[in-house]
Image (cartoon, rainbow, N blue to C red):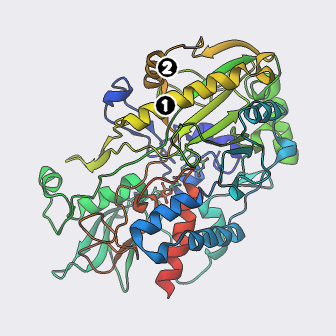
Amino acid sequence: MISMPIGYGKSYFDPKVNWCLYTEPDPNTGNRTHYWPRGKILGGSSAINAMVIMRGLSRDFTDWAQKLGTEWRAEYLLQDFATVSKQFSFATFPEAMHPMCTDFFDACSSHKIPKVADLNDTEVASVGYYPLAIHKGKRVSTATAYLDPIRARKNLTILCATKASKICFDDQQCATAVETCHAKRGTECFTARAEILLCGGSIHSPLLLEASGIGAPKHLQQCGIAPVVHNDHVGAHLQDHLGASHYYASNQATLNDALGTWYGKVRAALEYVLFRRGALSLSLNHAGGYATLHPDSQHPDTQLYFSPMQFSNAPDGTRPKVAAQSRNGFQLGFNIARPTSEGSVHLTPEGTAEIHPNYLDTTYDAEMAVLGSRFMQSLSQHPAFADTITARIEPTKLFETDAEILQDFRGRCGTVYHPCGTVRMAQSPEDGVVDPKFRVFGTKGLRIIDASVFPTIPSANLSAVVMMVAEKASRLIKS
Ligand SMILES: Cc1cc2nc3c(=O)[nH]c(=O)nc-3n(C[C@H](O)[C@H](O)[C@H](O)COP(=O)(O)OP(=O)(O)OC[C@H]3O[C@@H](n4cnc5c(N)ncnc54)[C@H](O)[C@@H]3O)c2cc1C
């Protein structure tokens, strides 16, 4: 279920490979608790994600460079994307994608959003087939691309099912060791000869810092942790892509035919086992891209998705999300590309994560939610889709007013699984937690390299950007 691409529907709720986190009730989204899956396996979330590989827009990195200095110039990061592309296989599969993608492209083109061949070579509103981290019918993760080729190295030891519980510091705030716990081996301590690199992701990296005494005194005190370095930014500035899908029943056979019926499942399983082809060898995100919807936007501000399948409409967390229904359907989805709301994540005295996404906290985000939802409505009314749609499943009708639209969005929106920024990078400890060389302010010998260091959320899915940033970090450390 990890290696078979569509298996992410199963790993989505599997605690063996997934941290299965829940947020606190979120006031602006109907006081709902949101389910936040995170990979708990080699490869992290790249082993359970939807495999879309998008490098973001250069304006994302120009903004980073303004905050971080010339070493972070956009063109350098884009070169890092080229380096990632050599090690990490991804591709588009136009011939394998559902024919209804063409309807999606037609509907977008009527909004002056053209189809392009490569969504990683565009800076403007455009759509296309999504580049996917799939090679020969199998998922490519950071574990398969980066770890597998070097597993035999003598200077590499991989300890699975081993949780880092604390980073230990000497009295000069130099990180000297990592304390770990394992169900059978118990607590162990590993001494660092050079440096410690923390790559726990946007939820767990700040938690481990707090568990180690780095953070805001009030949060450390609540957990009875002795402070080592005071930094109020630890766990703050949490950003995430928030989106919503619109579901439709269709008179054309979609992936529901392949994955929602017993005969379809048998056919798909045979096709996959024999040829590594078919519905099981793909992501559900067949096409998508960028739109520019806000009248004041100079750049794309919305990410789009077309998925030729209708999932279960069950509330978050009650049953597997990617449970195909037998009725043919599809979904149009969007998320705000650069939301401005910020939430937080902190350690609780019980050692768990207290996550406040604080979605839709800004007027801009609420406006974008309305614009994105209106755009979904408009696409669905385009002749390309109008003949195909037999019923509106969710929402059940077209809304007229902004208030109705926002109410629907508040009630149905959810994470697109891209938390970041919780130990953000900045030029000084007054603004962030790590410096532009990934070093934790106020400490020696400790760097953080994952999505938690992003100064701001990029305009597209995060995993390619995580790898670009990691390439940069590895070059920097080696030099
Ligand atoms: C369901 C889902 C779908 C997604 N779809 C896409 C997509 O299509 N395209 C895309 O680009 N992005 C997608 N993402 C997001 C993307 O996968 C993540 O943003 C990215 O993998 C984050 O990388 P990271 O290195 O910051 O953290 P992670 O990949 O989460 O890695 C963190 C690692 O640290 C480990 N860890 C944490 N705490 C500890 C500890 N205390 N001790 C030991 N190990 C620890 C974790 O187990 C994990 O292996 C999706 C994510 C999910 C969950």
- In the image, taking residue 123 as reference, residue 278 lies left or right, namely right
Question: How many numbered marks have been drawn onto this rendered protein structure?
Answer: 2
Q: Is residue 455 above or below residue 6?
A: below
For disc 2, the marked residue is 405
Callout 2 crowding tier (Cα within 10 Å): few <14, some 14–19, many ≥20: some
For disc 1, the marked residue is 369
- In the image, taking residue 7 as reference, residue 228 lies left or right, namely left
Q: Is residue 326 visible?
A: no
Q: Secondary structure at mark 2?
A: helix
- Which residue is depicted at the point 79% across and 20% down? 383
The percent position of residue 23, horizontal first and vertical second, equals: 35, 37
- In the image, taking residue 352 as reference, residue 159 lies left or right, namely right
Question: Where does the N terminus fall, quadrant-wise?
Answer: top right
Q: Residue furthest front?
A: 296
Amino acid on which the number 1 mark rests in the picture: Ala
Q: CA distance from mark 1 to mark 2?
A: 8 Å
Q: Is residue 446 above or below residue 388?
A: below
- Which residue is depicted at the point 18% across and 82% down? 172
The percent position of residue 238, horizontal first and vertical second, equals: 36, 49
